[in-house]
Every structure is written in structure tokens, then in C-alpha cells.
Image (cartoon, rainbow, N blue to C red):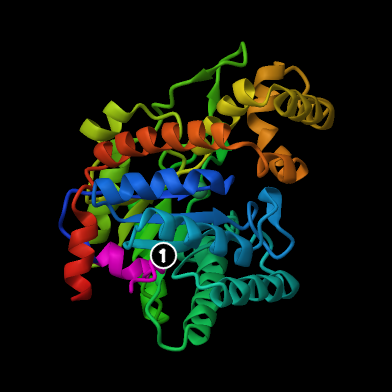
Amino acid sequence: MKEFAPIPGSTILNSIEGKRMIIMATNTRVTTVARGIFRAAKDTDSAVFMELARSECDLKGGYTGLTPKAFSERVRKAAVDAECDVWALHADHITVKKGDAKEIDDTKKLIDAQIEAGYTSFAIDASHLFNFEGKNLREELNKNIQVTTELAKHIGKRMRGAEFGLEVEVGEIGRKDEHGLVLTKPEEAVVFIKALNENGVYPHVIAIANGSVHGNVYDEHGNVIEQVSINIPQTRAVAKGLRDNNLKVGIAQHGITGTPRELINTEFPKGDIIKGNVATHWQDIVFNVLKVYEPLLYKDMWNWTLETYRAKNPGKKDKEIFGSNCKFAIKEFFDRIYSVDEDTERAIEALVYAEALIFFRAFSSKGSANLVREKLG
Ligand SMILES: [Zn+2]
């Protein structure tokens, strides 16, 4: 009997080497969406990552109200329900912002809990530890290299020889300076990965700053607009830089929500980008269904979010304040969101299933699950 347990992220990413495919990684902040995603993965024979970031899911529940253990149990159950066998359980953005001893220690405790809960893949994000006074790239990245190495070695030790996926990050996603979004240069990615390799750390995938932002993008009226800011030539250049230096690492594209799927399908450098994170999109589906099916719950979440976040967002329209901060209502209204009736859940699942089909198509991931099965023998 198959258990439909998660498999190592490394096995999935290594299996598509040389193929023009992107593996979708979904942040299921409300785990009700997991079954629809798994069903679409199974029906398209696509491998998939299930993930939540540290901000979303930590030992205290993050803003989704889920601990690593609770998240793991819920998505495993969804995998069993959908009979989906090729998926990884990934820790997205294990973010370290200061890099002091206390933060590193707390981070190791989080990682231990993730491993205990059966995670098979990890993204260390120490990209905030950028030294603006550094005299060269190596000096600028030194702290990121140091912290990423320490945490990667900790994961290796605690996994006791078991395979696992490793994602690292250089260039904080969405960071802006006076000229606009700061993009990762090819040399930066090369210096970073080379230094990690010298330290005995071999990531499978690297997240870079390439023009995307997390979450939706809004116009001046507070309406969601399409995101077309991902710099594709720069992304190709980073991938080429890594390849030219014989560094075997693909690119993880973060912040895909809002990017037109036809653009992903025809313009994204599939194979250079090998992992694509989609997070806010699934949350938007849940909230749009609740708006119709559970008007009272939706109204309470709307009021709570605006009361809590209006003062912090002067000059912004209510629609944008709600859109950008409704994620924090998930924990606040946890019990009500997870006790909606089956009509509501059916509508969420149906929409999620259809949307996941479109993403898998745009990512060309059909058949990737079988490549993984072949690799597993
Ligand atoms: Zn991200």
C-alpha cells in the first residue's frame, strides 16, 4: 500500500534536469486548497511542492495558525485523499534577518520541528544579511554565506543521511532602492553558490531578485493589476552565469501571483527556472469564494483587517489594504474558515483544481511526476 508520503525535493528537481519544465510550489495558507492542487497534479502527472514560509507557519503557528506538524498532517491527508504520490513538503523562506545567536538558535529549533514533521525540502533565506559596506561581492555576501552554510549543515546533520532539497536565496526579493527594484547580477549568484560549494553545501535551486514582488500588485485605485515586471533576460543571464561556471543549480521563481499565465507559458525560460512559487493566488480563490458563500464571515474578516491595518497604510484604498493584509485574518478566523460547509469547500476545490491545471500547463510540468518515478526506480 502506498502511503503518498512526501519525497525528497532534491529527487524531484534532479529528475527534470535538462527538461524545459518548471515544478510548481504552492503555499497553501488555507489547506482546504491542497486537495484540488493534488488532484490537478495527479491528473496532469505533475510533481508538486507543498510549502509555507516561516512567516506563514512556525512553532507558534505563523499567520496561518499552522505549526509545521499541523501543516504536514493536513497536506499529507490531502495527498492521500487525492492519491498523489510525487510531491515534496518544503519549508519556504526560512528567513534570518539579523543573524545573531538567538535568531540562529530559534531557526534551528524551527528546522528541527520541520524535520520532525517530515519535511523533505528547505529554503534558507538569509538574503537580508547583505553588507552594503562590503568592498566586493564576496564581502557583501559574507554573512549570507556564513548563515546559509551553518543552517544547511544543521539540516544535513538532523536529516541523518536522508536526501533533501535545498534552496538558498541571494538578493532580497522585492527590495527597492532609489532606482527601483534591485536585481541580482549573474556574478552575485555565481560568487554565492561557489562559496557555498567550497563550504560543502550544494543547493539544488537558488531564489534571486529578478523583478517580481510577493503578493498582488495594485493600481492607484486599489485594483489588482497584472504583474509583468519579471526581468526575463536578467533571469536567463543568471542561469547562464551559473551554467558557465559548472554550478549545478536551477532558479526558483518567487512571487508569480498576478503574472499572466500566457506569459509564463511562452516567455519564461523553463529549465533555467525549475521551481515556481505560487502563494497569494490560492488565498485569493478562498477569499473570493467566501465572499459569496459565507458573506457574514467575509464581512467580519473585512472589518477586522481594515480596523487592524488601516492606520498603518495611510493614503491606500480599502481594497488594497484588505488585499495586502487579509492573510493575517486567516489565523484570527481560523475556526470559522475551517468549519465552512461542504458546498463552500466544493466550490473552493473546483476553482483551485481548474486554476492548478492552468498553472501546470503554463509550467509544462506534465509528465514530470513520471520522470521522478523513473529516477526512484
Ligand atoms: Zn518567496
Q: In this view, does 292 lie above or below 264?
A: above
Specify whether 200 is left or right of 217. Answer: left
x and y percent of residue 103 in the render? 71, 69
x and y percent of residue 286 in the render? 56, 33
| Camera-side residue of 374 and 229 | 374
Specify whether 289 is left or right of 309. Answer: left
Picture quadrant of residue 108: bottom right
Kindly identify the residue that appears in the image at 21 percent across and 47 percent down: 366
Q: Is residue 306 above or below residue 214?
A: above
First to last magenta residue range: 1-14
**Would residue 245 be visible to someone looking at this image?**
no
| Camera-side residue of 253 and 128 | 253
Q: Is residue 61 magenta?
A: no
Q: Residues within 10 Å of mark 1 (few under 14, many from 20)?
A: many
Residue at mark 1: 192
Q: In which quarter of the image is the N terminus?
A: bottom left
Mark 1 residue element: helix
**Would residue 167 be visible to someone looking at this image?**
yes
- The amino acid on which the numbered mark 1 sits, given as a three-letter code, is Phe
| Camera-side residue of 88 and 252 | 88
Q: Outermost residue toward the front? A: 342
Kindly identify the residue that appears in the image at 62 percent across and 58 percent down: 54
| Camera-side residue of 18 and 207 | 18
Specify whether 325 is left or right of 211. Answer: right
Specify whether 72 is left or right of 25. Answer: right
